[in-house]
Amino acid sequence: MSFSSQRVDVKKWKVFTAILLIMTVCLASGLYYYYTKYNVFYYTYYNQLRDEYEELTSKYNDLRSMYEAISQERYRINDWYALLRNSVNRRLALGDMGAKWFVMPGFNGAEKVINDVTGGWSDKANWNEYWDDIKKIYDWVLANVQCTNDPMYPLLPELLSGPIQEVQDYWRLPEETLAGRQGDCEDQATMLASMLLTYCDEQYTVWVIGLTGQSGGHMAVAFPVEGDKLTILDTAGHFYTGSEYGVLCAKDIRTAVNEWTKWIDQANPGAHLHLIFSHTELERFSSIDEFVDWVPSNGHKVVKLFADLDIIHFQYITIIGYSPIEINLYYINEGETSTMIDSIYINGVPVLSYSPIPILGGDFGILPSLCEPHVQKEGIINLINGVVDPSGNQLTHGVTIRITLHMTNGIEHRTLGYTL
């Protein structure tokens, strides 16, 4: 190859290199231009996005704070609603704890009524006093508390958003029943049970006893008695466990319940016992047999029987003219233990203190005279018209007399007044 030829090749390479360099510079300038242009665009866009992100983050934090505040308010509202629901629905005695809440020994006003009606249980060993006072309390509730139907009452749903139902039921507190002097069967029963527990200082078991039938439920008061017996007091149903002469007593558990359910069955067909409760216990029963077995097997604090002398008939017979006067007194021991009559009084004066001395006959002939449970007795008093006591008071026609039978245990039983 000649030297001139080589120079031509070098020149070509220089031209090619210059062109390549120019193209490279142009390409680099273009790339730099576009890089700079789009870098500014993307940087501006990035800053815009970052500002938007920070703004959204701020809004999110605000919304989160609002959400947390709303959540706290929601929890507070739910807690408030739960308290409101429990307070409102409690008056329907729902659940096993609901009914127990309404038996309140020592409720406001109970002790005053008990003392006004009975004077309180002064001698805890005197069971005649106990039984007499229980009947007095029953009679007071019967006479002073009007039996009324429950109003319609709201049943609040579990959730605040749920529907509200209305039911015809409303349980009053004992002090409300006492203050208003009105209530239906469960109101009267819970008040009476609370009063009896107050009377005995909660030393003996007292229940509210419930039955159900075709017309709904009904409630009364019951308490266990020694010897596997039971007494039921139902002021709303105008019923109590009584003897054939109307004396409050105790009967074997099955008989006491059957007599009560038979009485209620007249207005509520198919009535049968299904639960008892007090402030300390609640039990449900599927049959009377289950209840009969349950009562004596759970260590309840039972009350004792009494020896009560009840005079069921009182009359006098004039034998000859106005004198002598024969008084025939029929009486029966409605208690479960025997008792003895040791003396007889007329108008508070011993019979043997009158002059001339009246003649005693029949079951009064020999004193002390035994009075067995549920055995009818007849005592006879023969007196001359005009007999006088040590103070000079005469027993003659037109005078009102009261006969008192004094027992060896110190208890006295007095008849109603009767005009000779």
Image: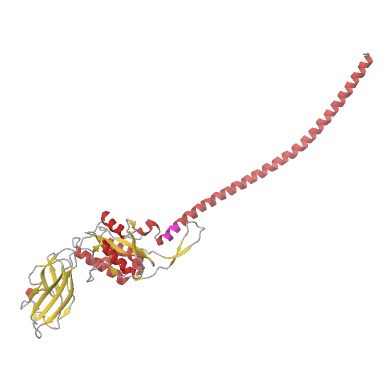
Give the magenta part as a residue range. Answer: 83-89
Quadrant of the rendering where the N terminus is positioned = top right
View extreme (bottom): residue: 321
Is 360 drawn above or below residue 261 in the view shown? below
Q: Which residue is drawn at 8% across and 74% down?
A: 361
Query: Looking at the picture, how far across and down is residue 3, in whole percent?
Result: 93, 14
Q: Main secondary structure of the magenta part?
A: helix
Query: Looking at the picture, how far across and down is residue 43, in whole percent?
Result: 72, 38
Frontmost residue, 165 versus 362: 362
Task: Identify the colour scheme used.
Answer: secondary structure
> For this view, does 112 lie left or right of residue 216?
left
Residue 170, by quadrant, is: bottom left
Residue 398, by quadrant, is: bottom left
Query: Looking at the picture, how far across and down is residue 353, in whole percent?
Result: 7, 74
Q: Which residue is drawn at 46% across and 56% down?
A: 82
Say if residue 141 shows up in the picture.
Answer: yes
Frontmost residue, 197 versus 152: 152
Say if residue 107 shows up in the picture.
Answer: no
> For this view, does 5 lie left or right of residue 413?
right
88 inside magenta stretch = yes
- Number of labels in the image equals 0
Residue 359, by quadrant, is: bottom left
